[in-house]
Image: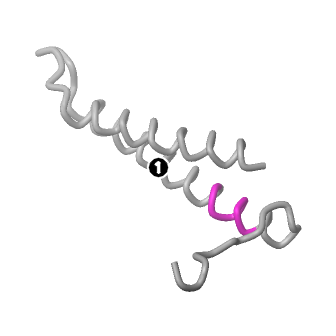
Amino acid sequence: MKTLMVILFVCVLLALASAGVFMLRKGDADEDPARRNSHMARALAVRVGLSVALFLFILLSWYMGWVRPTGIPAGA
């Protein structure tokens, strides 16, 4: 379960990075800026969807007992 959570988190970071690349890339002279913006918006929408899925999966895992919160030990 923890492996799946790490994989989802890495996918969130990759989607964020790809949106950043679309935002910073100048593009060719013949490339439409609206097309670049739509790619960036889609990458950000994927990131939000993956983040929500990860959050819900963590809640489900906690509810089912697959993962347990350990917290910070007292006096540490």
- Badge 1, how many Cα within 10 Å: few under 14, some, many 20+? some
In percent of width and height, residue 47 lies at 48, 48
The picture quadrant where one finds residue 61 is bottom right
Q: Is 57 a magenta residue?
A: yes
Vertical placement of residue 17 versus 63, above or below: above
Q: Please report the residue visible at 28 percent of the width from the left and 31 percent of the height from the top.
A: 21
Looking at the picture, the colour scheme in use is one colour
Give 2 or 44, whichever is nearer the viewer: 2
Position above or below: 25 against 60: above
Q: Is residue 62 above or below residue 16?
A: below
Total tally of numbered discs in the picture? 1
Residue lying at 56% horizontally and 46% vertically, measured from the top left:
9
The answer to which image quadrant residue 22 occupies is: top left
The residue drawn where x is 28% and y is 38% is 20
Q: Position of residue 34 (x, y in %)?
A: 25, 35
The residue sitting at the right extreme is 64
Tell me the SS state at disc 1: helix
Residue for badge 1: 45
Q: Magenta stretch containing residue 16, yes or no?
A: no
**Outermost bottom residue:** 74
Q: Main secondary structure of the magenta part?
A: helix
Q: Depth check: 65 or 59 in front?
A: 65
Amino acid type assigned to the residue bearing label 1 in the image: Ala
Q: Position of residue 49 (x, y in %)?
A: 56, 53
Residue sitting nearer the eye, 25 or 68: 68
In this view, the residue in front, 1 or 41, is 1
On the rendered structure, is 54 left or right of 48? Answer: right
Tell me what residue is drawn at x 21 percent, y 26 percent: 32
**Picture layout, residue 64 above or below residue 2:** below
- The range drawn in magenta is 54-59
Relative horizontal placement of residue 65, taking residue 42 as reference (left or right) = right
Q: Residue furthest front?
A: 75
